[in-house]
Amino acid sequence: MKTLIIFIVCLSIGALQTDPYADQREDMVDQQLKRRGVNDKEVLEAMRTVPRHLFVPEEHVGRAYRDGPLPIGYGQTISQPYIVAYMTEMIRPKPEFKALEIGTGSGYQAAVLAEIVDQVYTIEIVAPLGKAAKKRLADLGYDNVAVKVADGYYGWEEHAPFDAIIVTAASESIPPPLIKQLKDGGRMAIPVGSPFLTQYLILVKKKGDEITTHNEFPVRFVPFTRSKEKDD
Ligand code: SAH
């Protein structure tokens, strides 16, 4: 009996210690997100849950919960936590949603979405990043995320239309195929602007044939690149 109790106590301590980053995530949510006005409960819960430190290269693990972007290789970055939370809030995610993300990168934004919505489709143009993200998301049990290596300009026709689209690379204009693949009543969050000048985070809303756009605030994203062929 005594041994059994000790065993159970050890098991519970083990369980408590499995995530040494939980406190850092809680601080990130309080100081970087809530304080700046992110208040969607589901979004905050997703940000509290996704282990961001497992989405950054080993040498940056200690900085994973800091208030900024971090390099993930191939000249790309994982976005600042606030931007990920803000963009997720912008599309007003619902559990029944089918969402599309362009610019998988580390897979972090896809994981945050996958905590809230039913199904996530995400496209990455840099093959090694796409493959690594696919494995990472599968290892973490995100079986509601599908990753494809391709030029996201064309969206993902077979699974369209989408309730929401998040684009995480800055494009000079909004790719028409993405507008087409947005559901009636759908929302898209996309940074628009030149890589060297000011970019704005834009909210696109589709109602019938009417497309409205709203500038949120200036941002800095890596450029939206294009492949020479239609698909990889
Ligand atoms: N959402 C990512 C952030 C990645 S940075 C995360 O959570 O980690 C933006 C990513 O967009 C980069 O990985 C870049 O390679 C990718 N990208 C740029 N142009 C693209 C395109 N046309 N199609 C798909 N991905 C693209």
Image (cartoon, grey):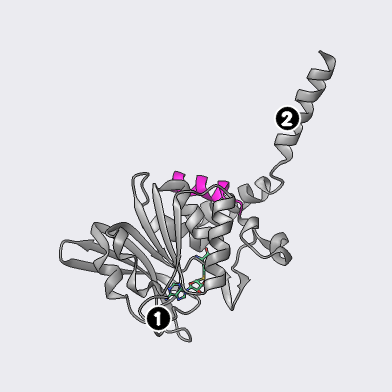
Residue 224 image offset from top left, x and y in percent: 44, 78
User: What amino acid is at disc 2?
Assistant: Ser
Residue 185 image-quadrant placement: bottom left
> Dot 1, how many residues are within 10 Å of its Cα: few (below 14), some (14-19), or many (20+)?
many
Mark 2–mark 1 CB contact (< 8 Å): no
Magenta span contains residue 44: yes
Q: Dividing the picture into quarters, in which one does residue 106 lie?
A: bottom right
Residue at image position (40%, 48%) is: 117
Question: What's the magenta region?
Answer: 39-51
Q: Amino acid at mark 1?
A: Gly
The residue that appears at 59% across and 68% down in the rendered structure is 69
Viewer-side residue, 76 vs 150: 150
With 88 as the anchor, is 28 left or right in this view? right
Question: Pointer 1: what residue?
Answer: 193
What is the number of the mark on residue 12? 2
SS for callout 1: loop
Report helix, strand or loop for mark 2: helix
Residue under the image location 38 percent in, 69 percent down: 190
Disc 2 crowd, CA 10 A, few/some/many (<14, 14-19, 20+): few
Please report whichever mark, 2 or 1, sits nearer to the chain's N-terminal start.
2
Q: Is residue 81 magenta?
A: no
